[in-house]
Image (tube, grey):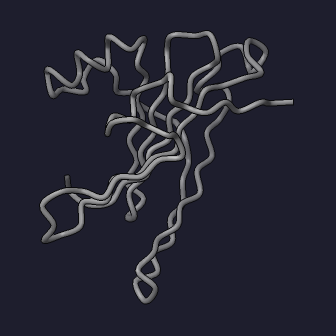
């Protein structure tokens, strides 16, 4: 609710645990690991990220803000070891969704967008995510 955020969701196909990574235009980052969908519901009810926050070294990002064209850009590098302790050997397909919340100042509601065809505004609806195939 403090501004614009780009969100990355990743889950190995067939797995329950998934990751959510946030990047803001000022390159502020947040990384979370949800052990299952029920954890996301608990976090929503409690309004606390304590059980899902991933501390320490994590993913890298860089942002470029271009106010003259009203845009910003982000590059994210997510080490495989962070999301897959087996170094990628356990899954070649991953469910994914790339999403954005834009809480523009002066607007009552955010503009939300996603690469997933969500039927309602909830980015955690994993059955609507796409599939990445790693070769």
Image position, residue 102 (x, y; %): 31, 59
Residue 21, by quadrant, is top left
Residue 14, by quadrant, is top right
Q: Is residue 132 left or right of residue 43?
A: right
Image position, residue 106 (x, y; %): 13, 71
Q: Is residue 73 left or right of residue 3?
A: right
Q: Is residue 51 left or right of residue 47?
A: right
Farthest residue to the bottom: give it: 68
Quick check: 106 above or below 101?
below
Residue 93, by quadrant, is top right
Q: Residue at x 42, y 12 (%)?
A: 35
Image position, residue 87 (x, y; %): 74, 20
Quick check: 16 above or below 99?
above
Out of 81 and 105, give the one closest to the viewer: 105
Q: Residue at x 49, y 40 (%)?
A: 117
Image position, residue 47 (x, y; %): 15, 28
């Amino acid at each position: 609710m403090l501004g614009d955020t780009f969100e990355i969701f990743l889950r190995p196909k067939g797995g329950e645990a998934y990751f959510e990574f946030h990047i803001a235009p000022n390159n502020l980052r947040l990384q979370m690991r949800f052990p299952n969908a029920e954890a996301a519901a608990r976090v929503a009810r409690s309004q606390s990220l304590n059980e899902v926050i991933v501390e320490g070294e994590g993913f890298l990002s860089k942002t470029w803000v271009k106010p003259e064209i009203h845009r910003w850009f982000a590059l994210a590098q997510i080490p495989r070891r962070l999301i897959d302790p087996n170094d990628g050997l356990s899954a070649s397909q991953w469910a994914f969704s790339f999403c954005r919340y834009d809480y523009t100042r002066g607007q009552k509601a955010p503009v939300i967008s996603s690469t997933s065809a969500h039927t309602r505004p909830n980015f955690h609806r994993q059955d609507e995510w796409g599939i990445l195939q790693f070769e």
